[in-house]
Image (spheres, grey):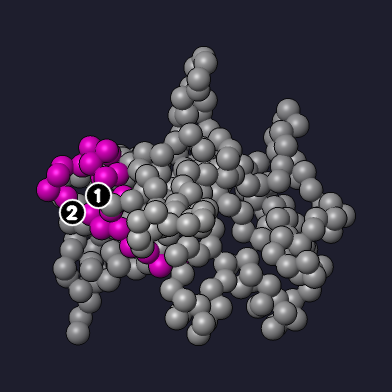
Amino acid sequence: MQTNEVVIVAGVRTPIGRVGGALAAVRPDDLLAGVLRGVVERAAIDPLGIDEVYAGCANQAGEDNRNVARMASLLAGFPDSVPAVTLNRLCASGLEAVNQAARCIAVGEAQLCVAGGVESMSRAPWVLPKPEGAYPVGSPPVYDTTLGWRFPNPVLAARFPLLSMGQTAENIAQELGITRAEQDAFALESHRRAVAALNAGRFAAEVLPVSVPQRRGAARVVAVDEAVRCKHNGHGFELDTDLERLAQLAPAFSPQGTVTAGNSSGLNDGAAALVLMSA
């Protein structure tokens, strides 16, 4: 079977905000709408020609519910004739969206797709189940949907450990013998490279600044990733952590563990989008 060559012609992303940080006041559908609008403008294409919008989203428990891809495409001003679908492969949801778009183009089902993803861990809601009967006794369980499982099926829980990604990382580190020192060193190098990229302007072409309304005064424009451990020294950015400080952090998921807030993935807010088409 002959397939079409698929190319990426444009891509943008928001800055990555920390949970409770600079992007916490922005709804996830608005975050996604911004990058959808921005990537179409960057690619200089007519939205009417888009065959499908794919967006990954792992939470979907709050403002990102009910097909956030569709809501965001309408908020972005796309014609209502452009279809959109939300995909959930948890941490790989955005990658799955790109894969789905690429496959559709490769087999000739589409010529032009927009694919990306969104997450707002800051705005992930607390949820509670409905009672199974009237006037239940006791307090119902309340789940924080920011991270991990909610409403687990007891049969599945008995067969498989329902772990968060942080707990899974602890298991992998133990299984493969990855030490705390190795994880801290890897994290420090990641921050060092990010600071170097900031100073070299390597993120400028891909980051779409986000205007965040404030309660008082002018809107705040967020243009720099919050997760990078750095500070501005008046001339540029400099690294604001080291191995000694990383080593002082307590384990986040297990008292005797090796995964900390300094060497693991953060809790973040952000969105990204690509335009894909046949060559």
Q: Which residue is at a point 51% across and 56% down the rendered structure image?
A: 138
**Along the polypeptide, which appears first: circle 2 or circle 1?**
1
> Residue most toward the left?
81
Can residue 225 be seen in the rendering of this structure?
no
Pick the quarter of the image with the C terminus: bottom left
Q: Where residue 173 sits: x, y (%)?
A: 70, 76
Q: Where residue 17 sits: x, y (%)?
A: 55, 43
Q: Residues within 10 Å of mark 2 (few under 14, many from 20)?
A: some
**Kind of residue at badge 1:** Arg
| CB contact under 8 Å: marks 2 and 1 | yes
Q: Nearer the viewer, residue 238 or 263?
A: 263
Residue 138 sits inside the magenta stretch:
no
**In this picture, residue 204 sits left or right of residue 4:** right
Q: Where residue 276 sits: x, y (%)?
A: 30, 58
**In this picture, residue 202 sits left or right of residue 46:** right
**Kind of residue at badge 2:** Pro
Q: Using the rendered view, name the quadrant where residue 30 is placed.
A: top left
Which residue is identified by label 1?
A: 70
> Residue most toward the right?
244
Q: Which residue is at a point 82% across and 68% down the rendered structure image?
A: 181
Q: Is disc 1 placed on a helix, strand or loop?
A: helix
Q: Which residue is at a point 66% across and 77% down the rendered structure image?
A: 171
Residues in magenta?
67-92
Which residue is identified by label 2?
A: 83
Q: Using the rendered view, name the quadrant where residue 35 is placed.
A: top left
Q: Residues within 10 Å of mark 1 (few under 14, many from 20)?
A: many
Q: Using the rendered view, name the quadrant where residue 52 is placed.
A: bottom left
Pick the quarter of the image with the N terminus: bottom left
Can residue 237 be seen in the rendering of this structure?
yes
Q: Where residue 47 sits: x, y (%)?
A: 20, 44
